Amino acid sequence: WITSWFRNLVFGGRFLAEYIWIGGSGTDLRSKTRVLDASPASPSDLPNWNYDGSSTGQAPGHDSEVIIKPVAIFKDPFRGGNNILVLCDTYQPLDDGVLKPLEVASNGPTWGVHGSNSRHAAAAIFENPAVKAAKPWFGIEQEYTLFDADRVTPLGWPKGGFPGPQGPYYCSVGVENSFGRDIMEAHLTACLNAGVKIAGTNGEVMPGQWEYQVGPCEGISSGDHLWISRYIMQRVCEKYGVVVSFDPKPIRHGDWNGAGCHTNYSTEPMRNKDTKYTYTPKEGDFAGKELHGGFAKILEAIERLGKHHTEHIAVYGKGNEFRLTGKHETADMNTWKYGVANRGASVRIPRDAFNTGYGYFEDRRPASNMDPYIVTSKIAHTTLLTE
């Protein structure tokens, strides 16, 4: 009640902007508050700011300033009123005043998870005329696991032990099966209030694990909405005293599902029932069959993804090798295959798209900790700008 009492105080015509950015690990989110005198109509109305990059693993101590530049605005569901959440990307200021997209040095493979500015390069791909003309839509399924504050015990699990086997927990009800529903509901409501394009939510296969869906969003906005949804999730968990994990295999021993970030994708020609196009796939279930319309576009895009499977796996999330084993509704990470309604495939074609002849497909390979800027732009680049 103390927090509520202070929240009800008036701000004297001023308002609060929570500047949010991605930290040095590539999965941690950082934020700080700025008091402003005028309400912005767009991100360009907001001032750039800076932070100590040496404290986030993104800059050396002798040259520690990192500039944050506002790129998207959402309502603040925690403070309410006219207060806002401000998503930013990160830049290194050069001596001549130029802002260079931040690049953080790495000692080895990052698997697409790092503290560099990935949004800048993704935006360039989405601004490509061929990509813009295709109107790429993304729907991302964010899976996550809730842990007690000890960061060891998943919510609902006995301390030092294991719950009953998987089976009763997916989309479940009841105190014996569903763990963390209040957190799920709070996150859903907060995202709706903030203006995040959240589409749904459900309990997942492993107890203590949940999923929510964001989209459809076009182009770069998909990454913006997913990152803000993750920030909101962490803030909600803060209030409940639990820890949210985006580890793709949080429990590595035993018969337990991992956590993914399945990415659903379509272009305007794929989802248009009136598309005029012909394509004959060279591999898989439809090899040698002449396909037509949006479904032909879907298969053409899927085959392009197959040609670049290794490149995609290399940027689809850290620790994905523990999840993509060929078990627990995954394809082995070293194997490429697609199929209709096949959740053991790299790419799944929904039954509805197969029956109607148009729609979308689901890339099931991305890990739950993937960077949505990298994954969505990589899909767009491979399917629209390569052969």
Image (cartoon, rainbow, N blue to C red):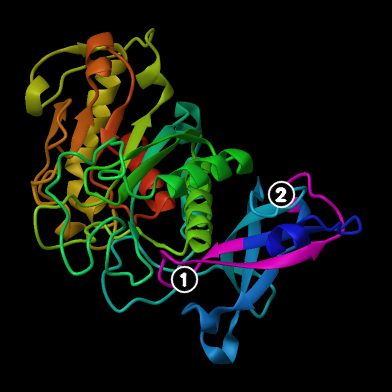
Q: Secondary structure at mark 2?
A: loop
* Residue 281 in the image: above or below residue 378: above
Nearer mark to the viewer, of 1 and 2: 2
Q: Residue 49: image x %, image y %?
A: 70, 69
Farthest residue in the bottom direction? 62
Mark 2 Cα shell of 10 Å, populated few (<14), some (14-19), many (≥20): some
Q: Count of labels shown?
A: 2
Mark 1 Cα shell of 10 Å, populated few (<14), some (14-19), many (≥20): some
Location of the C terminus by quadrant is top left
Kindly identify the amino acid type of the residue bearing the numbered disc 2. Gly
Quadrant in which residue 271 is drawn: top left
The label on residue 103 is 1
The label on residue 46 is none
Pick the residue in front: 98 or 261.
Answer: 261
Kindly identify the amino acid type of the residue bearing the numbered disc 1. Glu
Q: Which residues are magenta?
A: 20-44
Horizontal side of residue 126 vs 205, given as left or right: right
Whether the magenta-drawn stretch holds residue 35 is answered as yes
Q: Is residue 167 visible?
A: yes
Q: Residue 150: image x %, image y %?
A: 34, 72
Query: Is the Cβ of the residue at disc 1 closer than 8 Å to that at disc 2?
Result: no
Quadrant in which residue 114 is drawn: bottom left
Horizontal side of residue 14 vs 268, given as left or right: right
Q: Residue 331: image x %, image y %?
A: 12, 44
Farthest residue in the top direction? 274
Farthest residue in the right direction? 12
Q: Is residue 127 visible?
A: no
* Residue 124 in the image: above or below residue 281: below
N-terminal label among 1 and 2: 2
Kindly identify the residue that appears in the image at 11 percent across and 48 percent down: 165
Disc 2: which residue: 80
* Residue 315 in the image: above or below residue 63: above
